[in-house]
Amino acid sequence: MAEHYRVAVKNPRSRQRTEPPASLGEIFTLVRQGKRTRGEIARATGLAPSTVSLRVETLIQAGLLEERTGEAATGGRRARELQVRARAGVVAAATLGSSHLRVMLADLSAAVLHDVEAPVDVSVGPEAVVEEIWRRVVDGLAATGLEPDALRGLALGVPVPVDSRAGAIAPSVQLPGWDQVRVYDLLGAHTDAPLLVENDANLLAVAEAALAGPAVEHLLAVKVGSRIGSGIISAGVLHQGASGAAGEISHTPTGGTSAIPCSCGTDDCLESVASGSAVAARLRAAGRDVPGTAALLELARIGDPQVVAELREAGQRVGEVLAEVVNFLNPHAVAFGGVLSTSAPFVAAVRGVLFQRCLPIVSAVLDVREGRGGPSAEALGGVRLILERILTADAVDKLVAERR
Ligand SMILES: [Zn+2]
């Protein structure tokens, strides 16, 4: 079983320590957070410059940091800038959808080295799908000139609620049979690297919070694809809930008419009324040739009035459910991911309902928009989460001790 983890995706004020950070691992963390020079580290820690230099040298010799000559400051000499030594290792993030698998590799500075999407048939069962994921990770490592033992961590995103501590995946129609398996054992058969499995909307939230910048401490990410889910960043921390189901808005009753069956038992749940699959099904029932969400978006792009009207209606329903959540959470931003996030009529309809229904004190600070991460957002979130997990100050201290 994977150990419990709690992930600060930013540097939340509430979790800052009162004493200055000073261990090797804490100095490494400062560099990751943007302290680029020995002088900045000395100021942040209160350590003597000679002590900072000694510790930075230790981190450089351990292969974790490197120093390069930065841009010349006006009138000054060129500053030597510290950065994470990118080639110190590589992490992988795989995100599984109902029909697609994305595999991303990134170095320890979170720079993307490899990002490939491929079709996948999840009906072959979890064992075969995990085999396929691992094969694609190994292929990616080979394509970037690396061996499997270069892997320092692997994150897997799944389109269903998951308790990431235990690796327990909720029963679902999206991933039949996955609730019966211990996913950490399946992945662990291929690698000794640290693992994490997380809901895809939570990964979207991690990525969008990082891309939104430090001013956005509270964010709600909403994935609207063939299904609907959301992830919450509160005070810079991913909020997973007691069993990993926080943000699971998919099955909230809407008062609308469902267009697809759902196993949740609520016959007008948000997913069965307003997801991409539901909108496509409703159009098919009206005699339109809309096999899936891709066709739906193509028709919306050329301004098909019936399709645009259906997307507006879906946005209205999503907005009505989100308004209560947004009033409750008071986020800086609502960022959309998934295929419907690229539909302007859909996002505009959600935005309209939110600004109509949210309290002025809530809407005054609220930004509602398409996410910035695009189709790779969830994989980027996976990369960031696994890096936070493996590059804790304690983990870096341990790594340096091993390499000395
Ligand atoms: Zn449902």
Image: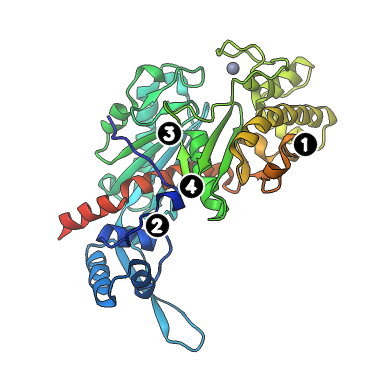
**Mark 4: amino acid:** Gly
- Alpha carbon distance from label 1 to label 3: 33 Å
Disc 3 CB within 8 Å of nearest ligand 1 atom: no
Q: Position of residue 400 (x, y in %)?
A: 20, 58
Image position of 43 with respect to 239: above or below: below
Front of the two marks 3 and 4: 4
Which of the marked residues, 4 or 1, is nearer the chain's N terminus? Answer: 4
- Alpha carbon distance from label 3 to label 2: 21 Å
Q: How many marks?
A: 4
At horizontal 37% and vertical 72% (from top left) the residue drawn is 43
Residue with the mark numbered 1: 356
Front of the two marks 4 and 2: 4
At horizontal 48% and vertical 82% (from top left) the residue drawn is 73
Residue with the mark numbered 3: 198
- Alpha carbon distance from label 4 to label 1: 27 Å
Front of the two marks 2 and 1: 1
Left or right: 77 as drawn, with respect to 303: left
